[in-house]
Amino acid sequence: PTTGKEVHPYAYAQMRPATLRSSLGRAARSYSGKGKDIQFGADARAKMLEGVSRLSRAVALTLGPKGRNVAIEQMFGAPKITKDGVTVAKAIDFKDPYENLGAQLIRQVANTTNDIAGDGTTTSTILAHAIFSEGYKAVTQGTSPVDMKRGIDRAVETIIAGLKDITKNISSKEEVTQVATISANGDMDIGQLLGHAMEKVGKEGVITVSDGKTLDTELEVVEGMSMDRGFISPYFVTNAKQQKVEMEDVSVFLYAKKISTVQQILPALEFIARTGKPLLIIADDVEGEALAALIINKINGKLKVCAVKAPGFGDNKTNMLHDMAVFCGGKVFDEETGMTMEAGFDHTILGHAKKITVTKDQTIVLTGHGDQQAIAERRDLITEILKKTDSTYEKEKLQERLAKLSGGVAVIKVGGASDVEVNEKKDRVTDALNATRAAVSEGIVPGGGVALLYMVPILDKLLADPTLTDDQRTGVRIVMRAIKLPASTIVTNAGGEGSVVIHKLLADKKTSQGYDASSDKFVDMFQAGIIDPAKVVKTALVDAASVAGLMITTEAAITDLPPEPGAGPAAPSLPGMGY
């Protein structure tokens, strides 16, 4: 608002720093200070529990082989239909700020479980809701929330130790297929594709998921060393029909810098012309006179040659060139390391490969002549760097390099009749892929929720521990009730009676026996192939107990006050704005 005096716009720039800071401070407060609302004790927890319960109910519907789909409205495009727990959780926001507070905390549980294990998000949501709702009742009846949380933590530690005893390591393609099938909600086709992919590229290999262009889901395995760069010029093409460069028994020349004049590589070209072998040049770039010379010699039949840009950027580009050098048994020509061609060309820096295939956007080098020990050492070096880095981007790039040196990349192309179907199937394939990796790294446990269910007798023994207080025992009992819920929910979603099935399983006391919801039978879970990765089960429990325990001990909740009806955000009032 103006004061009656008009202030010239440039006068604002002449203000003293202290006055300017004060004006900006007032403006910021008037713009963002809409006030806060605080709820205490049972009132805060009750409203948070309402949000947690509503979110958990929506997520729990997707659990098990007979779990249902959830339709989610999208801001743009068609609605999304999914059976992926974390996708459902991410889509939920409530109007009531306190309900939303509880829902967002549970959403964090699902996200964390998804980030660490890649699967188990529905289980973690169900566990978190169960622990918080039971804990809320106990606190309302006078139990100490802090002691109860200590009891919950003791119970979780005991379960983690107990799960180790029933964990089984996996190695065969059949076991990998079983894990993938269960995680893909019983889709055998997806399970077999993933089993085949992991068999082809190995444990360290990269498996990626992309949109397909057909109705069917397909697997494409790229064996050998591949790069996401194609030929620089279509004049290098040798197979005009398929627009490919295909050459056998190839020399590979790796150049660290840009090649712009033919003099930079003339000695190398003269040597290649004498040998008569095909040549693949991988450089930072090939342009101008140098590119023209290569094309002319290729067209005239004097050289069988193809030039490709080096993949990646910065240090990653240099590292990938050196990976290729190790794979092909050559060296990277780099003037910065003192290499020169003035005294003649040292042909020992050339790498060699049995066959290369280059398209407009990909280069595949098959059967490089690199020393196997040198390749193994290079892999070990990358693995060590991978263990030490915290950056997600760096980890992704290092895993990609490791996979290429390990022998291949598999791409699962997800097909379907519509975008909605493709996206739903992609969610399941990604879940199955993450579960499979987790199973290979830390082993498997019986699936269908029974791995946690069979920890109930172990917690019964913990209750007899004389060092526990009464409130801590309450915490243990809460976890004991919560770990029955995943198995019970799977049975309920299949149309059965959860409590009856759980009672029978606990009475039989066979740790590998469980309920097959898809066929309504009691079976040996390992033999039936109904298995979960141990890492997924552990991560789901630990994350759920951690966040639920913090919510139980919450005594105050603070949220923003909603804006008054008809009041939009006020524009900041600054000197000179009345001009």
Image (cartoon, rainbow, N blue to C red):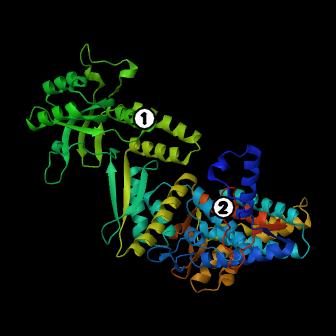
Q: Amino acid at mark 2?
A: Gly
Which secondary structure lies at badge 1? helix
Q: Position of residue 328 (x, y in %)?
A: 32, 33
318 vs 411, nearest the viewer: 318
Left or right of residue 11: residue 336: left
Asked if 404 appears above or below 215 in the picture, the reply is above
* Residue carrying label 2: 578
Q: Amino acid at mark 1?
A: Asn
For discs 1 and 2, the disc positioned in front in the rendered view: 2
The residue where tag 1 is placed is 319
* Picture quadrant where residue 115 is located: bottom right
Label 2 element class: loop
The 10 Å Cα crowd at callout 2, few under 14, some 14 to 19, many 20 or more, is some
Residue at the location (43% across, 51% down)?
206
Of 121 and 564, nearer the camera is 564
Question: In which quadrant is the N terminus drawn?
Answer: bottom right
- Residues packed near mark 1 inside 10 Å, few (<14), some (14 to 19) or many (20 plus): some
Residue sitting farthest toward the top: 343
Looking at the image, which is closer to me, 511 or 575? 575
